[in-house]
Image (cartoon, rainbow, N blue to C red):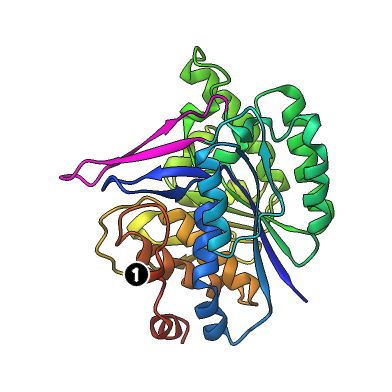
Amino acid sequence: MIKKIIAYSEPLEEINAKGEVGVSGDCVGVLVGGKRMEPIIANVLDDHTPVTFSLFSAIGNDARGQKINTFLQNNGIDISLLSVIEGTNTAAFSIDIEMQSGKHTMRYHDRDHSAVRQLFNSAHQQKINDLINALDQNSFFILSGIGASRPMTDEAYHNFFDMVKRAKEKGACIILDPNFRWKLWKKNPHDTLEAAQQYGQEVMNKLVKFSTMVFITYPDDLAYFAEVAATPETLGKQLLEHGPRYVVVKNGDKGALLFSKEHHEHPLTISPYPANAVDTSGAGDAFLAGAVTALAHGADIVAALKIAARTGAQMVQQHGALLSTQSVPDETLLRTDLA
C-alpha cells in the first residue's frame, strides 16, 4: 500500500528577505517540507509505509519554469501531474521584512498571464483526469486559497469544482488551507477590494463544504468567513457545521485548537513550542507538512498536530518560505513531544 500526498499549488520563484533566489509558492512548501521531514516522522511513528509527494499544477516554458521543474525533481517531488503550457509564464514573489517589527510583506510578480490560470480550461481536461485517476482512499489532496484564486473564468471554476467533487467521490482526504490573500482574488486590475473579497468568500465557503480537514490561520482567514464571529472558538465551531471532519484553528504563539465531533463544544488545545522567530513566512506550510506527513504514516489527529506544532516552530527560526535540509525537526524532540 502506498500513501499519496498530492497538492494543487502555484509554484513560484521566491526572492527571500536576504535577496536569495529560490523556489517556493503556495503548497510547494508543504510538499518539499514534507518530503524532507518524512524519514524522521516515519522513524518516530515506526511506520515505513511508502509515501509519495506529487504536485498538480502548471508552469510556463520559461527560465523560471525550468528552474522549478529541476528543483522539484531534485527534491523528490513527482511531477507527472505538472503541465508545461506554451505561451504562458511562471510567476514569482518576493518577501520584504521590516527589521524592527519583523512584519513581512509578500509581493507577487507576473501572475496575470501565469500558466496556472490556464490549467482549468477545457484544453487541459486530460491532466485533471490524470489527477483523479491517481487519487484513492489512501490519498491526501491539498488545496489552498492561493491556488483556488487562479481560475478566473466561469468555465475554469466549473472545471475546478468538478475536480474537487470527483476527488471527494474517489475517497481522498481533502485538506483545505484558506491562506488569505485578497489581492489575488481580483479578476482584473480594476476590481475593488470589496468585489475581490466577495468573490473569495463565495469560493472559500463552497470549498469548506467539500473538505475533510480545514486548517485556519487566525485571525487572517476570518476575512473569508465574514458572517462568523471573530473568536477562534466560534470560528472553529461554525466551520465544523459546514461538513469537515476536522477544523484546526492556528493562532500563532497561542497554539492551535482542534475541533471535531468529539471536540465540538470543548476544542482540544495543541500547545505551541518555544521558538526564536525571525521570519513567519512558510510557517503555515511547515505546520501542514508536518500534520499531513504524520497522518500518512498512521498518526492519529492529535499526534499529527503535535508534530505539526514542532515543524511550524522550526520553520519560523529561519528566513524564507521553504524548510531547509538543515532545519528539519529533531527526531529526539519529536519523540519527547509524543511521549
Q: Do we see residue 286 in this rendering? A: yes
Q: Position of residue 113 (x, y in %)?
A: 57, 25
Look at 52% across and 15% down and name the residue there. 191
Q: Position of residue 267 (x, y in %)?
A: 52, 62
**What range of the chain is rendered magenta?**
91-113
Using residue 214 as the reference point, say whether residue 278 is left or right of it. left
Look at 42% across and 53% down and name the residue there. 282
Mark 1, residue position? 273
With respect to residue 88, does 288 lie above or below? below
Query: Disc 1 marks which amino acid?
Result: Tyr
Look at 64% across and 37% down and name the residue there. 205
Residue lying farthest to the left in this orientation: 100
Badge 1: few (under 14), some or many (20 or more) residues near its Cα, within 10 Å?
some
Q: Nearer the viewer, residue 166 or 26?
A: 26
Q: Nearer the viewer, residue 300 or 294?
A: 294
Q: Do we see residue 235 in this rendering? A: no
- Location of the N terminus by quadrant is bottom right
Using residue 203 as the reference point, say whether residue 233 is left or right of it. left
Whether the magenta-drawn stretch holds residue 237 is answered as no
Q: Position of residue 12 (x, y in %)?
A: 49, 42
Q: Secondary structure under badge 1? A: loop
Q: Nearer the viewer, residue 86 or 232?
A: 86
Using residue 268 as the reference point, say whether residue 273 is left or right of it. left
Q: Nearer the viewer, residue 91 or 64?
A: 64
Whether the magenta-drawn stretch holds residue 112 is answered as yes
With respect to residue 171, does 138 lie above or below? below
**Location of residue 39 by image quarter:** bottom right
Q: Position of residue 161 (x, y in %)?
A: 75, 37
Q: How many marks?
A: 1
